[in-house]
Image (cartoon, rainbow, N blue to C red):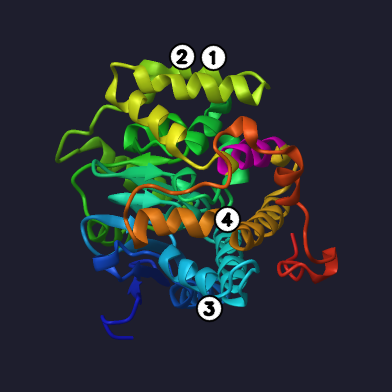
């Protein structure tokens, strides 16, 4: 494949035999936003690498300095929804179905996958990142699930991995869409390793020359990089406000949690204030969906989470809130979405329940062919 391809695939010979495989998202001008072609290319190649005995491990990274992956190509999804209002366009269902299947493959991959999370990692980018066995953050990392701003919900497995964030702080991340840095990601167990000042090429070269026999070698090389930082690692925001946030999200009363998080808008701390303001201006429907998806997913398997999310995503595509959110943020860029409901108190319970009700039977579910 040429360097013009949206995903670049390569292999590197390892000193002890076999190869290290490398997949690079290659749309840096769009911050490596994930489209259907990229999803299909990644799924096909990762499936092949998983069964290829000469491949010892996989590295996944993004071309360019700004982002690993800033999310899914929601502009294309908006255009499809605009052209077919009131229904779920087949192209939208196909994108979400294939994206979730790719994410599930990464979560369950039989070999080490190292995801090099440099720069922006948002939405669909976290879907790729969260399933890797080794999730590396750097001094430039900025993670977020900002679906509250576009009327969607934290999908791509968010029902699963946000529930794994300690002390229910995944709910805080999902409701506010707040950005966290590498130190925060380590603290919240969203990342496994942090290095600073190194490129993915440094890591690949060291691993390729190592006495590779298992994923423990990957851990050793990453420990070496962490132990010799080239630049300072930014301090996180979570620790300073951990007790406050934990107290807010520890209850079961959605309205109380919502009101207290929106109350952060008045904080003198810029990071907290931005989180509160984002929630306040975000979709009231999304706020309910975030709370409900995490509540309903607590006892679900990873695959069951993806199946639930696909039902929700298709409903978002037909309901109109998602289309309006993308319009306001990325199409017309007026920053003034007209949400279906004025506030969270106005959203009827039956409307939220409808987002969890499938339009197909279990055996017709687009992900029914996947085995756990």
Looking at the rendered image, the disc whose residue lies closer to the viewer, 3 or 2, is 2
Q: Are marks 4 and 3 in contact (CB under 8 Å)?
A: no
When the figure is inspected, residue 255 is found, relative to residue 220, above or below; the finding is: above
Q: Which residues are magenta?
A: 286-295
Q: Mark 4 vs mark 1: which is more N-terminal?
A: 4
Quarter placement of the C terminus: bottom right
- Distance between mark 1 and mark 2 Cα atoms: 5 Å
- Distance between mark 2 and mark 4 Cα atoms: 32 Å
Q: Residue at x 75, y 50 (%)?
A: 354
Question: Residue 212, located in which quarter of the rendered image?
Answer: bottom left
Horizontal side of 349 relative to 152 (left or right) equals right
Q: Mark 3 vs mark 2: which is more N-terminal?
A: 3
Seen as rendered, the residue at the extreme left is: 230
Dot 3: few (<14), some (14–19), or many (≥20) neighbours within 10 Å?
Answer: few
Q: Are marks 3 and 1 in contact (CB under 8 Å)?
A: no
Q: Mark 3 vs mark 1: which is more N-terminal?
A: 3
Looking at the rendered image, the disc whose residue lies closer to the viewer, 3 or 1, is 1
Q: Determine whether the residue tagged by mark 2 lies in a helix, strand or loop.
A: helix
- Pointer 4: what residue? 107
User: Could you tell me residue 85's position as x and y percent?
Assistant: 59, 69
- Distance between mark 3 and mark 1 Cα atoms: 44 Å
- Pointer 1: what residue? 247
Q: Determine whether the residue tagged by mark 4 lies in a helix, strand or loop.
A: helix
Q: Are marks 2 and 4 in contact (CB under 8 Å)?
A: no
- Pointer 3: what residue? 44
- Is 263 inside the magenta-drawn segment? no
User: Could you tell me residue 82's position as x and y percent?
Assistant: 51, 70
Q: Determine whether the residue tagged by mark 1 lies in a helix, strand or loop.
A: helix
Q: Which mark is residue 244?
A: 2
Q: Residue at x 23, y 32 (%)?
A: 234
Of 331 and 46, which appears nearest the observer?
A: 331
């Amino acid at each position: 494949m040429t360097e013009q391809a949206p995903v670049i695939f390569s292999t590197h010979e390892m000193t002890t035999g076999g190869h290290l495989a490398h997949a690079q998202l290659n749309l840096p001008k769009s911050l490596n936003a994930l489209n259907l072609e990229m999803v299909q290319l990644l799924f096909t190649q990762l499936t092949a690498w998983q069964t290829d005995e000469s491949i010892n491990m996989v590295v996944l990274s993004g071309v360019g300095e700004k982002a690993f992956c800033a999310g899914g190509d929601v502009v294309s999804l908006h255009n499809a929804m605009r052209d077919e209002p009131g229904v779920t366009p087949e192209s939208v269902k196909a994108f979400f179905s294939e994206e979730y299947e790719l994410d599930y493959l990464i979560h369950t991959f039989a070999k080490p996958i190292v995801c090099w999370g440099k720069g922006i990692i948002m939405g669909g980018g976290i879907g790729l990142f969260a399933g890797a066995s080794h999730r590396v953050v750097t001094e430039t990392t900025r993670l977020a699930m900002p679906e509250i701003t576009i009327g969607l919900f934290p999908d791509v497995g968010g029902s699963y991995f946000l529930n794994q964030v300690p002390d229910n702080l995944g709910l805080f991340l999902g409701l506010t869409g707040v950005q966290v840095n590498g130190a925060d990601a380590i603290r919240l167990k969203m990342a496994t390793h942090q290095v600073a000042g190194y490129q993915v090429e440094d890591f690949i070269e060291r691993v390729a020359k190592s006495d590779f026999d298992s994923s423990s070698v990957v851990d050793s090389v990453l420990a070496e990089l962490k132990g010799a930082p080239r630049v300072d690692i930014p301090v996180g925001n979570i620790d300073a406000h951990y007790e406050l946030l934990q107290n807010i999200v520890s209850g079961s009363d959605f309205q109380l949690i919502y009101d207290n998080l929106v109350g952060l808008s008045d904080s003198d701390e810029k990071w907290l204030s931005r989180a509160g303001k984002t929630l306040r201006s975000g979709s009231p429907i999304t706020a309910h969906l975030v709370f409900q998806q995490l509540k309903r997913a607590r006892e679900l398997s990873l695959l069951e989470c993806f199946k639930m999310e696909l039902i929700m995503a298709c409903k978002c595509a037909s309901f109109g809130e998602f289309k309006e959110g993308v319009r306001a943020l990325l199409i017309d860029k007026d920053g003034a979405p007209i949400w279906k409901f004025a506030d969270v108190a106005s959203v009827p319970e039956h409307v939220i329940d409808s987002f969890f009700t499938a339009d197909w039977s279990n055996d017709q579910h687009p992900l029914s062919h996947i085995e756990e």
